[in-house]
Image (tube, rainbow, N blue to C red):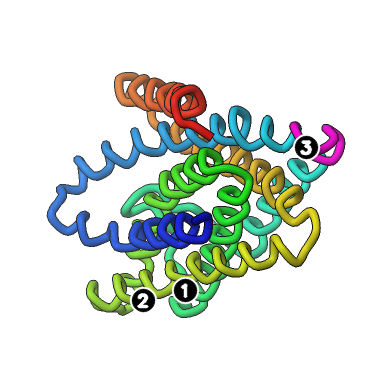
């Protein structure tokens, strides 16, 4: 039953790669407004997912020293990946740095999605609620990134149809990652104990170093305030999920 939910969840995450198709009929200004509020909500959801769900779950079965050490390791690892491997999360349909080597970009995204799949699998093995929360958090921060990836591929010479197809193929690596993570958990002792706080560190890094700084770039007070409330709503949403969604 766990494997079923793992595969279904990662397939849904993979479908997010097709989000680019919906931007074709949306005006740029409206799309920017939607994305800006989504960034705020996503930042709050990542913070809430890390501190209200993943870390408390980890602390029930592991020492605080181990949990927070893996948390710090996750933050450091995501810093290095973004700094040296350029796994940047693009948040505006026109604000992404264009990569010349589109196929290399696809390979990098495929590996990133593979890791996401492993994380989702490990989360569902702990509990259904933690798996659902982790999947939701990944979906929310994947939407802006997938829009950026779609824009990079189209700019790099792909047709829109080909860009969607290749982006989806890259995203399907999450399913393979999920199956691998599910199998590894039985073979590698303490894999779940490591990967979950490590992921929490990644969530904290993405929210504080990548998403929240994007919100500070907005000079319009009304839009900035809306994004702040979206941020709070993301945290509140994760708190409500913890209260109402069963284990």
Residue at point 71% right, 63% down?
Answer: 186
Q: Which label belongs to residue 61?
A: 3
Image-quadrant location for residue 35: top left
Q: Is residue 190 left or right of residue 88?
A: right
Q: Is residue 61 magenta?
A: yes
Residue at point 68% right, 30% down?
Answer: 56
Camera-side mark, 2 or 3: 3
Q: CA distance from mark 2 to mark 1?
A: 8 Å
Position of residue 90 measured from the top left corner of the image (x, y, whole percent): 43, 53
Camera-side mark, 1 or 3: 3
**Which region shows up in magenta?**
60-67
For label 2, the residue is 166
Find numbered disc 1 in the image and state the secondary structure of the residue it sits on: helix
Position of residue 196 measured from the top left corner of the image (x, y, whole percent): 67, 46
Q: CA distance from mark 1 to mark 3?
A: 37 Å
Label located before the other in sequence (2 or 1): 1
Position of residue 232 measured from the top left corner of the image (x, y, whole percent): 44, 22
Furthest residue to the left?
25
- Towards the viewer: 166 or 50: 50
Q: Is residue 174 left or right of residue 230?
A: right
């Amino acid at each position: 039953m766990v494997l079923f939910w793992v595969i279904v969840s990662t397939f849904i995450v993979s479908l997010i790669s097709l989000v680019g198709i919906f931007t074709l009929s949306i005006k740029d200004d409206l799309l920017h407004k939607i994305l800006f509020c989504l960034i705020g909500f996503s930042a709050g959801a990542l913070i809430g997912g890390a501190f209200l769900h993943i870390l408390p779950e980890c602390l029930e079965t592991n020492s605080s020293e181990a949990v927070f050490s893996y948390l710090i390791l996750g933050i450091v690892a995501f810093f290095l990946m973004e700094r040296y491997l350029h796994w940047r999360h693009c948040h505006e349909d026109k604000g992404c740095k264009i990569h010349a080597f589109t196929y290399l970009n696809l390979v990098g995204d495929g590996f990133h999605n593979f890791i996401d799949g492993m994380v989702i699998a490990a989360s569902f093995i702990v509990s259904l609620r933690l798996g659902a929360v982790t999947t939701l958090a990944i979906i929310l921060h994947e939407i802006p990134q997938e829009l950026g990836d779609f824009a990079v591929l189209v700019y790099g010479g792909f047709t829109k149809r080909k860009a969607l197809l290749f982006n989806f193929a890259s995203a399907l690596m999450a399913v393979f990652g999920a199956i691998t993570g599910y199998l590894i958990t039985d073979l590698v002792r303490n894999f779940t104990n490591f990967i979950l706080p490590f992921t929490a560190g990644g969530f904290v890094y993405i929210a504080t170093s990548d998403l929240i700084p994007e919100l500070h770039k907005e000079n319009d007070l009304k839009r900035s305030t809306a994004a702040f409330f979206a941020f709070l709503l993301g945290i509140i949403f994760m708190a409500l999920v913890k209260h109402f969604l069963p284990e």
